[in-house]
Image (tube, rainbow, N blue to C red):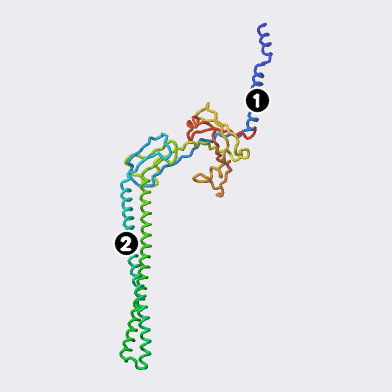
Amino acid sequence: MAKAHDTQKDKKKPNKVLPIILGIILLAGIGFGIKEYIYFGKHVDTDDAQIDGDISPVVSRVNGYVDSIYFQENTHVDKDQVLVKIDDRDYKVKLEQAQAAETGAGANVGVGQSQIFQNEANAAAAKARVTSAAAQLDKVSKDYQRYANLVKDGSITRQQFDQAQADLEVAQANYRSAQEQYKATQEQVGATRSELNVTNKGVDQRKVDVDYARLQLSYTIIKAPSSGVVSKKNVQIGQLVQAGQTLFNIVNDNSTYITANFKETQLDKIRDGQKVNIDVDAYPDLKLTGVVYNFSPATGAKFSLLPPDNATGNFVKVVQRVPVKIKINAGKDVMDKLRPGMSVSVSVIYKD
């Protein structure tokens, strides 16, 4: 009977542990809620972010077989470093052909100049003949006038007058002939000059052909457009490459940044120059900072391959995201660890 009485007394004792646990949980929840409220009152977060970088595709500008490769994939190269050499024998022959054509065109210019000098000499001689014919015509004309006066009073015979008249007609004909010859030689000089102009243009064209052939030859040496790490190698020795074919890519040095895709409803709190805390998934212990640099002019959906068209009638409103570029504040040793495509979480501090 005593044991049953004690058991009933134990059942009547209140359990104080459970309320204490519930109270602790409630206080922890309130504290966590206050902490989160204070945090999100100063920060804008997103985990839809990744590391980006400038990647330069290196393409072949000419067709040909790959002769030599001077790099290994995933290694660092310097700007203007020779990376690939294409067999250049065909392009050297084309350059020699263009140079030979230029030399031939230059020789034609020399011939044309000589022809002009010859024609100018002929024109000068023809002009001298015109002057001589004019002087002769002047003399014969004066003689004719004198004979015409003398024949009236019978001082000379009619035969002498006829001879003077014939001499005048011959002098006039010689003068006209000399003028026509002089005109013809002048026209010939003009025609030769025009031909020389055409020849000179041909020389200019041959010079252009030489420059183009030399440029094509220079394209057989493929150099690094910038300093960085070579990746995605897609070329082998002996491979036939085509103009415009991508051979490999270079991830440029000092071009790493973060692209964070914030919801459109978060943008009203984000401004250029705001401080950003960055967590890199690959390096949990690495804490980085950065600053907001700029905003994309359109949402990510607008740049997609098939952008949404809400005018079709089947419309479901979806919160859009806008890419925001963030610069990273870190030293070279840290930046070397980061790779484009790595996932990160960012927190923009919009209120101190």
Q: Is residue 57 left or right of residue 109?
A: right
Query: For residue 239, what is the image quadrant?
Result: top left
**Residue type at the position of mark 2:** Val
**Residue type at the position of mark 1:** Gly
In the rendered image, residue 9, in percent from the top left (x then y), is placed at 68, 11
Mark 2 → mark 1, Cα distance in angstroms: 100 Å
Q: Residue at x 42, y 37 (%)?
A: 78
Determine which of the numbered discs, if any, sits on residue 111 in the image.
2
Query: For residue 266, what is the image quadrant?
Result: top right
In the rendered image, residue 284, in percent from the top left (x then y), is placed at 52, 27
In the rendered image, residue 168, in percent from the top left (x then y), is placed at 34, 84
| Dot placed on the residue nearer the N-terminal end, 2 or 1 | 1
Q: Residues within 10 Å of mark 1 (few under 14, many from 20)?
A: few
Is 249 in front, or is 207? 207
Q: Residue at x 66, y 10 (%)?
A: 7
Question: What residue is disc 1 on?
Answer: 31
Q: Is residue 327 left or right of residue 184?
A: right
Is 323 in front, or is 277? 277
Q: Depth-wise, is mark 2 or mark 1 nearer the camera? A: 2
Element type where label 1 sits in the image:
helix
From what the image shows, is residue 90 above or below residue 290?
below
